[in-house]
Image (spheres, coloured by chain):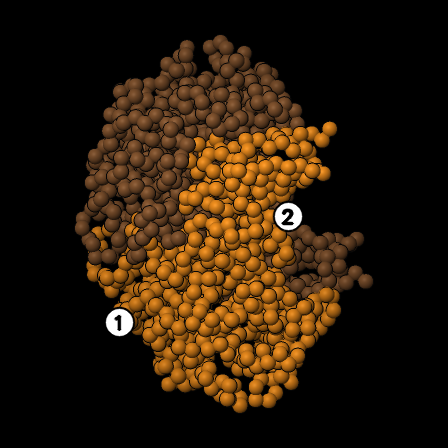
Chain colours: A orange, B brown
Amino acid sequence: MTQPTDADDRPADANRSTESAIDAGSDSERDPLFSRIPRRDFVKAGAATGAMASLAGCTGMLSGDDESTSLTDVKTDVDPGEHDDYYAFLSGGHTGEIRVYGLPSMRQLMRIPVFQPESARGYGYDDRTSEMLEDAGGYSWGDAHHPRVSQTDNDYDGRWAFVNDKANGRMARINLKYFETDAIVDIPNQQGTHGACCLLPDTKYVFGVGEFRVPMPNDGRDLTDPDSYTSTIAAINPETMNVEWEVLVDGNMDNGDGGKEGRWFFATGYNSEHAVTESEMSSTDTDWLKAFDVPAIEEAVEAGEYEEIGGVPVVDGTRNSSLNEGDRPVARYIDVSKSPHGVSVTPDGKYAIASGKLDPTATVVDIETLAEADDPNESIVGRPRLGMGPLHTAYDGRGHAYTTLFIDSQVVKWDIEAAVEAGEESTDPVIEKIDVHYNPGHLIAAESYTADPQGDWLISLNKLSKDRFLPVGPMHPENDQLIYIGDDEEGMSLVKDTPSYAEPHDASIVSADKIDPAKVYDPADYDEEFVGHEDIDISREDGRAHVKMYSTRNEFGFEEVTVTEGDEVTMTVTNIEQTADILHSLAIPEHDINIKLAPQETREVTFTADEPGVYWMYCAFFCSALHLEMRSRLIVEPAE
Amino acid sequence: MTQPTDADDRPADANRSTESAIDAGSDSERDPLFSRIPRRDFVKAGAATGAMASLAGCTGMLSGDDESTSLTDVKTDVDPGEHDDYYAFLSGGHTGEIRVYGLPSMRQLMRIPVFQPESARGYGYDDRTSEMLEDAGGYSWGDAHHPRVSQTDNDYDGRWAFVNDKANGRMARINLKYFETDAIVDIPNQQGTHGACCLLPDTKYVFGVGEFRVPMPNDGRDLTDPDSYTSTIAAINPETMNVEWEVLVDGNMDNGDGGKEGRWFFATGYNSEHAVTESEMSSTDTDWLKAFDVPAIEEAVEAGEYEEIGGVPVVDGTRNSSLNEGDRPVARYIDVSKSPHGVSVTPDGKYAIASGKLDPTATVVDIETLAEADDPNESIVGRPRLGMGPLHTAYDGRGHAYTTLFIDSQVVKWDIEAAVEAGEESTDPVIEKIDVHYNPGHLIAAESYTADPQGDWLISLNKLSKDRFLPVGPMHPENDQLIYIGDDEEGMSLVKDTPSYAEPHDASIVSADKIDPAKVYDPADYDEEFVGHEDIDISREDGRAHVKMYSTRNEFGFEEVTVTEGDEVTMTVTNIEQTADILHSLAIPEHDINIKLAPQETREVTFTADEPGVYWMYCAFFCSALHLEMRSRLIVEPAE
């Protein structure tokens, strides 16, 4: 293999001191963070370096270097024809999609377009999906951050995945029977929906966590009065995808996580300053972790203690709200070090752990005591000092937490109960650190969001790849690194570098046996009319034509379809195949149309035939040796 | 690892007889091909089975099974942080994109949107790229089939890749300095451009091979007169992307390849019947491989022997054309068995090899004798019998050809000179066969399209994956399988299964050292004005606003931008970073805008500010610990 040669561009050495690696790029002189973050010392745990060095070559399959390692009994690749053990759902960031990977192979099994039209699936091309995208605002992209999979009894139930759109304040639902997006809700009163997650144990709500503070409603009022800007969390019914209620808060929010017991929901936030410039937003030393008491909010809604804004009940959860007085506040504001970023609830439901981002600590909150505490800060039971730029935390189910250190480019493994025992700031709970490449955002461990994490695999979703892959121009891939965490004695082991297209933010990892996708469509699941061999038909009336036809190897129901220039044409097409994996499409040249037809699937497409001529409609999925001949002529006769 | 359990759905056994595996699905009773293809016997070479069995577990890295294999000295995976040896450019079919893989890891390093807007790159969102897509027809997708990389002296020169659009008759160019699409030409007189390839040795032309026969011009005339339909090949200047000339032909064409000597260009075709239905299109026993004599065509153009149609000179190359009489025909029609599909020229430039598709043979044409032969069929020097559904052929540089067998789901390795020695139909040239999974279309070997293939790796681009991966719903991934071909004694070895999103058709594999992408933009390469610290400006006049600003960690040039409802706003934004991999974007919520800004890159975007309110413009690339705070307010004041 070719070794990277561009040494000048290479980041600091793996064993560099933390002090020397404070920036996201490599020019620390100019990074504005450099002068802003407290530069405290901390003990770098020694375990990591040794384990890592011995495993640096561990993916060297059949390469002749067969020294025994801690991974001897762990298969870290998947033989041809064998299946992966896990599904991983990774967000696609500003591509607007979700990607499905297999673990441990890290192979991308499928893409699921969510917020953007996508022609290979015909998503946004057929009438049903284009109407869905139109009804959700008509945008051609979204910023998909946090894919969360539905749970029942704190375990994955294989029904849905949800993901937010930070760019347009939306939440989408992916149907895991068909691995396709089946609903998008445009959340009222939210300009940027950053966090997405479920209220457990049974996914009663999906929460959309609003980030950007704007006037409410944002219709031209209060433009230059930032104090009147606001943001909300939104509780969405996962079945109907209706927004049931929202809660107004102080400060910007970003990430969230639900407790395991159905009561508490947590959201981190920054900008308690209510500022509008970057320097002012990070001027105070603390911001808030917000804890929402869901039953208290529901009671307020029930009691009519809300204002209806944008068509939904909005409960006032700001600090000075009357609903936050008394012994049953709807929202509790917990002080944490400046600009906390990630929050996640431990598998046992005991703690919510928020990361410091601009502070080297994490904050451990005891959930059980939260309801009774006079001051919610009393529920803070630990504050381990982890390293520079702690962002997100995942769990192995054995009492360990794993936190990404954005600035240090590391993942730190630490002991949760040791952090509680230590109480105030301490590096004692730190067990081990491993270098990642480079600047990790989220990380995710197998089933970390459930009550029973699997404890074997962890992915570090790194924002920069720099020199880790062959160069591909000024836009680099990111680097999703697979780390084995199953051996506490040997420590964490870096196993794979996986380049990824911009920009996975978060992921959920689900055991393969908990999802049971269909291989063929069930026509009962959608409204379009199934068009069998006997049902083909062409009707024309008043400038509208309706063509009903089937597709099968190697033909469409009609060998030609004649319409008149100016006709509005609807084509209803069914793939009548029963065999899994035999897909067809209906592509119409020079008409910008391609609709996907999986076995037993029907889709409709409507367009105007506005240019006279002959157009060879064809199947874009290579379906048999006579695939090229699978065509039908669309003949558009001149109007007169 | 979980073994696939859905046995009913699994295709026939690897050692099944050819007779039992004739369909693309698994229900052979109903496949129309079953009764149409001649069912001849052929000898299945024995070498493959043994080699394959011993290597079935060869990717079991660190799995404990360390039996020595033929791959002992070959690294088939790439350690974390090490680089791949090759770039592979795979087409994305009806996604409209190109994907860049690393070999041998088979990791997807990058996506390059070509015919479709793509929001993570802001491709089709900024003014320059959206105008390019609009000028090329305004379609939102394309059907990208054949990525071919430019060559000089029959070797890759790292300048460009080209790819066709089958859906709309177009050709695109990708700039390999920046790994981005920089030109698309809408080819006149072509409805579906199927083939794409270069005239070698120096990429004098890029050829677009027209598939669909339509009236010319296709404006409503001759709608129901298929005999007057026609198709063309188009010669495109790679520098200007202008169509220099076209040649009119009989029959549909699909794939093409250029000779190594700058004279001949070859295209396969079907439908010599000039039919419009699938059954009629495959009714005769032979179709044509067309050989175009490029200097003869250039002379005809020079002499004015053309008709100008759609703005380009069109030379008549149909069989009965006067230009095909005499001893310097512009196009020679060579008879090959029905519906030949792929054609490729051997690395030494001696032979053009066309595959039978509906016939179990390939046809070997001696290029050197083609000019002098009275009847071009005299130049057919071999016709090896390879198996069922031969589609495409690649080369290892050691005298072997590798042909995909679509129906047999195999790759067959055969000896080219042995096929010439054998002359008429024979299975003797067959050396070995290996099962692939399933139904391969194209295959590609490392640098197979050059004069000097590397002879180590081969990818079989299989159209169906069926049960090879975890199920992901009715739309399955395809399966791009990596095969090691570097050991003629041990034979071909299947190394990796790689799932891929619909639908790679073809690929080019280039040694890593032959491409040298830039890591930072050179402002001299584009027209937009670089906006440095001193150049920021907001101007407003007559309902138009122009905002010039920079982006850098962690700020935009302006913390707020105020415009009036109804203003047409142009934003010119420069990423002033010098550090590779530090990207920013300008995302504008609820305005459907996201433009990517790599280091030193400037992009412009123009939109109408039609809704009063506050909009938080933000950076969608996670660029530093203060990424969330990198924002600017767009304030749209009510008109009055």
- Which residue, as the protein is rendered here, is positioned at the far left? B67
Q: Is there any visible trace of residue B588 in the rendered image?
A: no
State whether residue A321 is above or below residue B16: below
Q: Which residue is mark 1?
A: A489
**Quadrant (top left/top right/bottom left/bottom right) for the N terminus of chain B:** bottom left
Q: Which residue is mark 2?
A: B127
- Residue shown at 30%/26% (left/top)? B40
* Nearest to the observer: residue B606 or residue B217: B217
**Quadrant (top left/top right/bottom left/bottom right) for the C terminus of chain B:** bottom right
Residue A366: x and y, percent? 45, 83
State whether residue B166 is above or below residue A440: above
* Nearest to the observer: residue A550 or residue B577: A550
- Residue type at mark 2 is Asp
- Residue shown at 52%/13% (left/top)? B320
Question: Which structural element holds mark 1?
Answer: loop
Subunit ID for the residue under disc 2: B
Q: Residues within 10 Å of mark 1 (few under 14, many from 20)?
A: few
Residue A116: x and y, percent? 56, 53
Q: Residues within 10 Å of mark 2 (few under 14, many from 20)?
A: some
Seen in the image, is A323 located left or right of residue A523?
right
Subunit ID for the residue under disc 1: A
The alpha-carbon separation of the residues under discs 1 and 2 comes to: 56 Å
Count of numbered labels shown in the rendering: 2
State whether residue B503 is above or below residue B374: below
- Judge if badges 1 and 2 mark residues of a common chain: no
State whether residue B167 is above or below residue A201: above
* Nearest to the observer: residue A61 or residue A170: A170
- Which residue, as the protein is rendered here, is positioned at the far front? A534
- Residue shown at 44%/38% (left/top)? A623
